[in-house]
Image (cartoon, grey):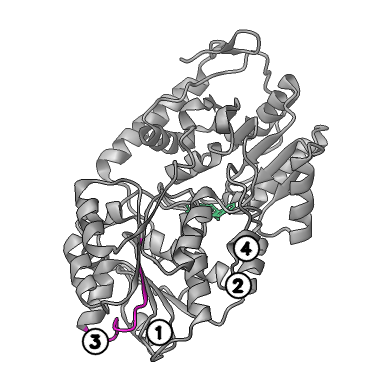
Amino acid sequence: MSNEITFADLKLAEPLMRAVADAGYTRPTPVQAQAIPLVLAGGDLLAGAQTGTGKTAGFTLPILHLLTEKSAAHPRPGRPRCLILVPTRELAAQVEESVQTYGKYLPLKSMVMFGGVNINPQIKALRGQMDILVATPGRLLDHVGQKTLDLSGVEILVLDEADRMLDMGFIRDIKKILALLPKQRQNLLFSATFSDEIKTLADGLLHNPGYVEVARRNSTVELIAQSVHLIPQKLKSYLLAHLIKHHDWKQVLVFTRTKHGANRLAEKLNSDGIPAAAIHGNKSQPARTKALAQFKDGSLPVLVATDIAARGLDIDQLPHVVNFELPNVPEDYVHRIGRTGRAGSSGAAISLVDSEELPFLKSIERLIKREIPKVTVASFVPPTNLPAEAPRPPRPQHGQRRHSNTTGSTRNQPPRDGQDQKRRNSQGQKPRSPQQRTPQSRNGAQPAKPRPAQQTADQQHLSEAARHQAMPQPALFSPKSGRRGK
Ligand code: AMP
């Protein structure tokens, strides 16, 4: 991290410091270092920060601190003290999860509220204590209409991803909500961009705000040498072992889609004489800490991680990041590869892509607005007599995360609350409550059906990939001549 400020400098309450340490964060990110003191001082804030910068902790930590320092004036059920408005269900679930993560040693209660799910469990939850409410605007107004929510006790308002809320047409809802809040309150506005519309909103909302602006965490994506190897799943581990050995890679972070896959790959690499360790949610904290320490000090060349495990790991500027499988959500690709090539250091992000993953690749290329060069390794000779392939776990639908607690927010804009509710009901799907805490259902998301046009394009892509793999491939990559695009 570029700044020298430590978490201790920020003077956060001890239970928050403990939660931060548990999350594995060693230093505040730039947005945290700048925003936390301003919020703690009680002023309004205008922050230019995108997902991936650590902005959620940037507002959540000082809010938790402030709410703990001062008790509620008139505590009543269904009367939050802090309202965090966000544009999407996914972001709502993620932000509330952060509130729980950072507030786990505090007695404060939080709730997440969004559309597309049955309103009754939310009404029931509103009958209990609730200090922090994370909500999407449409469903929040439904509750106001039903008089199940009282916004008169809001001391702190956060508009998160304000530009996206405006893009999604929430301005009228936001204005209605603002009119329901007490005049005396602290306002924090986070936005990735500053259009005239955002400036107008900020002018009307904020009083003498402090300003924070940080560069996108992944602004170096352009500088990272990215490549794709089109390769059947069953050959991936052999190719990876070959790449590591052939190029004598000393520090490689490998992302797998599943915990089981991470274990299997680490075992396979170890059996090939490449020291590797897997880190994921099923590993004990001491095992994870040890693996990370060895990886950082260079004694362990390969760390195999799931997205969740890699989250919060302060390991930047790696020479090599490998996507053993592509993530379902394109933004996760950017988060993953953003760990290499930072601050001008050269880095490479290598993705091993099976034909089934081509739709994911396409989405990633669309997001980063560039085609990733497809390369082959002339020196790699695939083994014959492969053991039978283990059955693959089912992959979530395109654009969906396996778990809700991943980095960043999905940019697949889900329909707005009301519309979403109607759509789901018309499909006869059973709405789920946000109280259901299974990893995939927690944000209430149901697998989205691919649109017909997308399906056709994807199918076309798949058959192209099948052809590609069936054909002998030209040597597009040779270690000496470097990388050449197709
Ligand atoms: P956000 O921009 O809030 O979506 O956060 C992006 C990611 O950064 C999340 O996965 C956080 O867990 C992680 N994160 C937040 N603060 C820190 C920190 N101080 N050190 C390392 N990772 C962090």
Question: Residue beneath label 1, please?
Answer: 125
Q: Secondary structure at mark 2?
A: loop
Q: Residue furthest left?
A: 172
- Neighbour class for label 1 at 10 Å: few (<14), some, many (≥20)? some
Residue drawn at x 54%, y 14% is 472
> Does the stretch in magenta take in 153?
yes
- Neighbour class for label 3 at 10 Å: few (<14), some, many (≥20)? few
Q: Type of residue at label 1?
A: Ala
Report the number of numbered marks: 4
Note whether ligand 1 is within 8 Å of mark 4.
Answer: yes
N-terminal of the pair, mark 2 or mark 4, is 2
N-terminal of the pair, mark 1 or mark 4, is 4
Question: Residue beneath label 3, please?
Answer: 147
Residues under numbered marks 2 and 4 in contact, where contact means CB atoms less than 8 Å apart: no
Q: Type of residue at label 2?
A: Ala
- Neighbour class for label 4 at 10 Å: few (<14), some, many (≥20)? many
Q: Which numbered disc, 2 or 4, marks the residue closer to the eye?
A: 2
Question: Residue beneath label 2, please?
Answer: 13
Question: Residue beneath label 4, please?
Answer: 20
Q: Type of residue at label 4?
A: Val
- Neighbour class for label 2 at 10 Å: few (<14), some, many (≥20)? some
Q: 324 and 25: which one is in front?
A: 25
N-terminal of the pair, mark 1 or mark 2, is 2
Q: Which residues are magenta?
A: 146-159
